[in-house]
Amino acid sequence: MALFCSIKCPGDLILKTYDLAQALRDTEIPVISGFHTPIEQDCLKILLRGTQPIIHCPARSLHKIRLSPEQKQAIGENRLLLISPFNASYLRVTAELAEKRNEMIGAIAHTIFIAYAAPNSKTLAFAQRLIAAGKSVVTFDSFSNPLLQEEGIAGLGMDAIMRRCLDAQTSQLRKASSINNDESSVYQCL
C-alpha cells in the first residue's frame, strides 16, 4: 500500500492516519512511500517498530543519504528497501523530483492511501491523475476530507481500508503462486 499526505493535515485525520499505520504494522502489510511530509515521517517511525516490509523512496539519489539507527536496523533485517530513480547528481529534494517519485510509487502500488490533500495542492493534482489512470485510491471517510471524495476517491473506514489492503495482498500472492506453478509445469514439459 502506498501512503501519501499533504504537508498540512486536519487533526482528526492525523490521528486516524497514525492508527492506520499501527494497523498496517500489526498486520504486516507492506508500505511504500516517500516518507517526506511530517505525517508520512511519523508513520515511518511507527512502521519501523514492526516487522513488515517497507519501501522508502526518497525524492533524491541514495548517494550520501543519512539513515536513522532504526532504518539501519530495518535494512539489516532485510525489511527496509530504499529505492530511487535518481542518480548521484540529485542530492537535494525538489518539487519536480518529488512529483516524479510519487508517479513511480503510484505505478508500483496496488492500493494508494491519501490521508489528506489540501485544496489546490500537488497531492490533490496527483490524486486526480491516479483516478484518471484507474488506480485504486482510498482515503478516510471524513468531513475533513471532502476534496478527495469529490474526485471519486473512496472514503472508507479503517476496517474497510485494511480489508482492501489484505485482499490486494492475497490477490498478489495468488498471482505469484500461479506464476510459480506455470513455470514448474513448463520446466516439467522441457
Image (tube, helix red, strand yellow):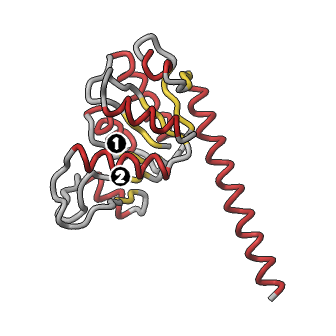
Task: Check disc 1 and give the amino acid type.
Answer: Leu
Q: Position of residue 122 (x, y in %)?
A: 31, 33
SS type, badge 2: strand
Residue at 54 percent of width and 21 percent of height: 155
SS type, badge 1: helix
Residue at 32 percent of width and 20 percent of height: 119
Q: Position of residue 17 (x, y in %)?
A: 41, 28
Are dots 2 and 1 in contact, CB under 8 Å? yes
The reply, left or right, for residue 35 in relation to residue 27 is left
Q: Where is residue 126 in the image (x, y as percent from the top left)?
A: 39, 36
Separation of marks 2 and 1 at Cα, in angstroms: 9 Å
Q: Which residue matches tag 1?
A: 44
Q: Which of the two discs, 2 and 1, sits closer to the camera?
A: 2
Q: In which quarter of the image is the C terminus?
A: bottom right
Q: Which residue matches tag 2?
A: 56
Q: Can you name the residue that lies furthest to the right here? A: 189
